[in-house]
Amino acid sequence: MKLNIYQIDAFANRTLEGNPAAIIPLDEWLSDELMQAIAAENNLSETAFFVPTTEGYHIRWFTPVHEVNLCGHATIASSYVLFNMLGYDKAEIEFESKSGRLIVKQKGEWLEMNFPSQPPIKCEIPQQILDVFNEKPVECLKSEDYLVVFDNEQQVFDANPNYSLLSELELRGVTITSRSEKYDFVSRFFAPKYGINEDPVTGSSFTQLIPYWSSKLSKNNLFAKQVSKRGGEVQCSYLGDRVLISGKAAKYMVGTIEI
């Protein structure tokens, strides 16, 4: 069996930035075991597979070790492939997913994702989080992930957590964040229990970051950066029960895999 594969850098102004994702269009689903094995072979933070439906496409995302319910950067990468390489000519793409209906529009160089909002709820700071960061957080909240807020962006830049301890937490991962001088806010994301110690740019984390910072900063339109080593800029809008998450993308590789 031969399958086309695309590697796209999402939330990137050029190649070798942002978050790389492998994209594999399908005519029909492969077995879960085979898709997971392909994702493990790719060894990127996410491999996305999609199949056509009557309304658009059904999309699924796999880390090297688990399937996940929502992934932003691989959705942007899939949309880039459809709009720019597979001849998709409608104004927007509708994806069916485990997180419901997702809409992506192309606006110039930017790809705008319409995702469900996941407002985090304030909680006690887990001991593992207190143990792995040098500075004590200002606040801790939780939704699909823990959202850990620090006093300033230098604390976010300097964080060097113990991934083994973070993998003991019950949620998917940990986002750390603070206000920023250049951006409205900065963030980093860690998900070692899913085989991703630090994710370069995590679109799904912004479903939690946007409602939090929109409330804190009293504004609905925000500009942010995930300050991993590769880094990536994100335009954000808060719509209440939905959020808009926008980024650019760049083609890195086109190929064929044989199974």
Image: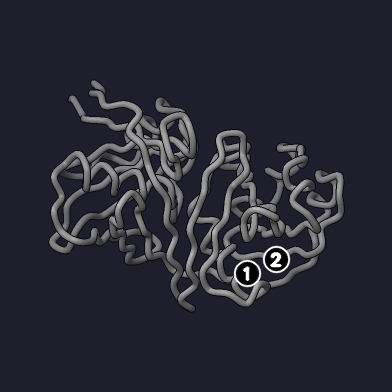
Q: Residue at x 51, y 69 (%)?
A: 221
**Could you tell which of marks 1 and 2 lies nearer the N-terminus?**
2
Q: Nearer the viewer, residue 244 or 121?
A: 244
Q: Nearer the viewer, residue 179 or 64?
A: 179
Locate the N terminus and report the quarter of the image it occupies: top left
Residue 87, quarter of picture = top left
Residue 210, quarter of picture = bottom right
Crowd rating for badge 1 (residues with CA inside 10 Å; few <14, some 14–19, many 20+): some
Q: Residue furthest front?
A: 182
Q: CA distance from mark 1 to mark 2?
A: 9 Å
> Secondary structure under badge 2?
strand
| Up/down of 1 relative to 238, above or below | above
| Coordinates of residue 3 in the picture (x, y in percent) | 21, 29
Point out which mark residue 141 bears: 2
> Secondary structure under badge 1?
helix
| Up/down of 95 relative to 67, above or below | below
Q: Residue at x 69, y 52 (%)?
A: 176
| Up/down of 21 relative to 91, above or below | above
Point out which mark residue 212 bears: 1
- Callout 1 amino acid: Tyr
- The answer to whether 22 appears left or right of 160 in the picture is left
CB under 8 Å between discs 1 and 2: yes
| Coordinates of residue 82 in the picture (x, y in percent) | 22, 46
Locate the C terminus and report the quarter of the image it occupies: top left
Crowd rating for badge 2 (residues with CA inside 10 Å; few <14, some 14–19, many 20+): some
Q: Residue at x 72, y 71 (%)?
A: 122
- Callout 2 amino acid: Leu
| Coordinates of residue 108 in the picture (x, y in percent) | 30, 53
